[in-house]
Amino acid sequence: MKKLLLVYALLQSVIGVAQEEDAWVYFKDKPQSATFLANPTTMLTQRSLDRRTKQKIALDEKDVPVDANYYSQLKNVSGLTLVAKSRWLNAVHVRGTKAVIDGVKTSLNFVQSIEFANKSLNKPGGKSRTVKHVKRPNKFSEIQVDFDYGIANTQVSMIKANFLHKEGFTGEGVHMAVIDAGFPNVNTLAGFKRLRDANKILGGYDFVNRSNNFYTGHSHGTHVLSDIAGYVDKSFVGTAPDASFYLFITEDIANEGPHEESLWVEAAERADSLGVDVINTSLGYTEFDNTAYNHTYSDMDGKTAFISRGAEIGVSRGMILVTSAGNDGNKRWKYVSAPADAKSVFTIGAVSASKSIASFSSFGPTADNRVKPDVLAHGLSVYVLDYISGNTRTINGTSFSSPIMAGAVACMWQAFPNRTNMEIMDIIRKSADRYTNPTAQYGYGIPDLEKAYKTTLGVTSVQDRDALLVYPNPVTTQLFVKSKQVNVDYSIRNVLGALVQKGVLKNESIGIEELQTGVYILELTSKNNTQSIRFVKE
């Protein structure tokens, strides 16, 4: 018996030594920073640089890639697997035994620090231990409900995204990235034909399998994309049907682990470098298959989880990151997940068609007592295009309130392209019905994009819109106006709401020769009525 116990003890010792861990290796510097910063197009596309310039965001060392020589030396370490890398955080996600990972810091002088996903190993004297592995159920399987066919009117009109569409803002010219679990049949379904025919799918990548085939994986991403870009004539319209898209897979359906956070950051960095404006991510992380890697509520401070730190940097680069709050509102863990806890991420909760809170919608505040979610959108019995049939069906989850809002965000930014990412989020947030009295599950409430749009323009009342017509549109020198109002004051504002011309409409025409090329709003104002219409000066 003593021999058996000794053998058992030795086996346990071997198992403990051989247990692989996930960790992030952080480098001390980026030796080639000066070269890259002097030649920015070697690391970022011109579109990405233009986005920075428009928002007056300077390039810095975070934009510089991870040093290739450092990466190569790390890759050559025996027993170490490199999973992902992040230029923003100057880190590489690795997998190996604790002994091998610890040895990296002593053998490679350019390594600054090591952070284990198993937080107990980051403490002095921390040791690998046998931990409980729980095979978690597919986190997407719980949010699907029975088929139901119909139109998507409620989810679009609840937040007044349909108003933006009527104004001509449908996402045209805005580049979006959807970071998700897979996009099967997006390349064949009729509901995405309009997107494909217009060449609005710009590319994509499967970071999990390191493959250029992104029309694969779990159907979750296909359903998410449909709420932004799906289009079935007279039946279903997403909130930004004319936006352009990159489709990235970072969710590993077979394994729930911290590597997915690193893959997400890598994808967000790719989106940034390509010049993406808005990212939707209907993913969130709190608990993993290896329970030693689980986050705690105290981690939900926007500064602890790797994905949240990456997301915060992504916003600092000038993008808007829209993410689902989480579906844990009626579970043991009821709070928002990472990266929804990040301060500058636009976090979206869920309500029903009647605007009642969905019980599953995750709660705020964050661990450092900030309001989350930011706003709410339809997420209970919400319509998507089914990834097999292409028909409409209902589904539940903040996974879908997020893309509904992300598409609307894209339309709002199209309407006000000279606003910064932070300004656009603030405009939408301030239009919400609970802005002055946010609560733990509602956040700031349901936004009103018509109100947000008019407030930004400085228009307080728009009536009898159909009675106002301008032509030609686009126009070069003379704008002709058909209106029920005559001998009324007119004003022309640019997309920032600044007054650029005013006068009195007398003979149904206005000379606009002095206006620069761009988008403008014509307003006709009488004692009890203001009419407003958009036109383009060529």
Image (cartoon, helix red, strand yellow):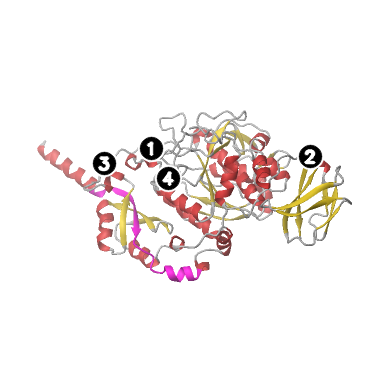
Earlier residue among tags 3 and 2: 3
- Most foreground residue, 173 or 501: 501
- Most foreground residue, 506 or 228: 506
Residue 376 is one of the magenta-drawn residues: no
The residue tagged with tag 4: helix, strand or loop? loop
Q: Residues within 10 Å of mark 2 (few under 14, many from 20)?
A: few
Q: Residues within 10 Å of mark 4 (few under 14, many from 20)?
A: many
The three-letter amino acid code for the residue at tag 1 is: Tyr
Q: CA distance from mark 4 to mark 2?
A: 46 Å
Q: Residues within 10 Å of mark 3 (few under 14, many from 20)?
A: few
Q: CA distance from mark 3 to mark 2?
A: 73 Å
Rendered position, 46 above or below 261: below
The residue tagged with tag 2: helix, strand or loop? loop
Q: CA distance from mark 3 to mark 1?
A: 23 Å
Earlier residue among tags 4 and 2: 4
Q: Are marks 4 and 2 in contact (CB under 8 Å)?
A: no
The three-letter amino acid code for the residue at tag 3 is: Thr
Residue visible at 27% across and 59% down?
Answer: 105
The residue pinned by badge 4 equals 302
The three-letter amino acid code for the residue at tag 2 is: Asn
Q: Are marks 3 and 2 in contact (CB under 8 Å)?
A: no
The three-letter amino acid code for the residue at tag 4 is: Gly
Seen in the image, is 99 located left or right of residue 200? left
Q: Which residues are magenta?
A: 17-39
The residue pinned by badge 3 equals 130
- Most foreground residue, 391 or 293: 293
The residue pinned by badge 2 equals 529
The residue pinned by badge 1 equals 297
Q: CA distance from mark 1 to mark 2?
A: 52 Å
The residue tagged with tag 3: helix, strand or loop? loop
